[in-house]
Image: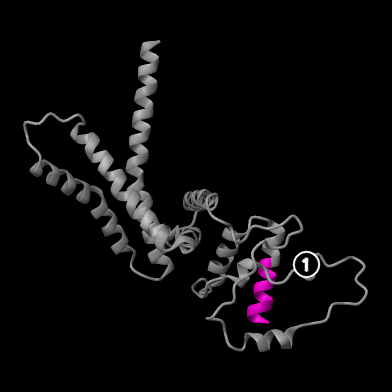
Amino acid sequence: MAILFQLIGTLIKWTAIAIIYLTPVLGVWLASSLAAYNNRSTSLAVLAGVFLFPILPMLWELRARSKGSRSKERILTWGDRLTLRTLVINFVAISALLVWQPRLSFVALSTRGDWMLGDLQGQPAQLIRQNLFKLANGLEGMYLSFNKNPFERYDDGSSKVQPQPQTDRDPFDNLKQQNTAKPQPANNTNGWAWQGMGIHPAVANMPSSVETSIASVAQYIVSKESDPVQRIKALHDYVADRIG
């Protein structure tokens, strides 16, 4: 029994260490996805990640050794101290990115989180791409569990949060909407399900930087709406609002 508990303890320890050393990878992924989303160099983000690990933790350890006494007995080993310093540094870095760009961070992960794959196709690339987007959605779910989701909907399908007016919209959008508005049929026996619901929040709140291609628009809508029917409505609203 003692051996079993020892094995379990060892497994938990190495699992925790593995998770800690994956935080730099998560930080690089987040920073590089933001860079790719904003059409900036991803190499700088990767270099920053190398600085956060292992360079900065090593410099911290060397500084602590130079200030401390060599004869003083240390409770933690060199590896334990490096692991804890890695966790602290990268946790602060990731938190700073999320505070700086809370919503854009997850949009970048959901739309450009696969930037390292480039134009690669085939089953392996698609599998990696799907897992990256699943991970991005999982991280966003964890974030939204502590924050209000602007795309959360009531049971009737209406949005709980009204879309905010955009300042970077085309000044002729209002005129376009007036010209393209069509009256609803007087005798609608089937009942149009979306009548009176207004434009989908994902379209109303879509950043202009997303509208660089049809693919990025589609990925943004998919990342913000899980209901397949509502995704169709969002695509319909986008075409009617932007192209019509």
The total of numbered circles placed on residues is 1
Please determine whether, in this image, residue 221 is positioned above or below residue 209: above
Instruction: In this rendered view, identify the residue nearer to me: 74 or 205.
Output: 74
Q: Seen in the image, is 228 located left or right of residue 134?
A: right
Which residue corresponds to mark 1?
A: 194
What secondary structure predominates along the stretch shown in magenta? helix
Residue 237 in magenta stretch:
yes
Residue drawn at point x = 30 percent, y = 46 percent: 88
Q: Magenta span covers which residues?
A: 234-244
Please determine whether, in this image, residue 215 is positioned above or below residue 133: below
Q: Seen in the image, is 230 located left or right of residue 145?
A: right
Image quadrant containing the N terminus:
top left
Instruction: In this rendered view, identify the residue nearer to me: 144 or 51.
Output: 144
Q: Seen in the image, is 78 located left or right of residue 83?
A: left
Image quadrant containing the C terminus:
bottom right
Element class at badge 1? loop
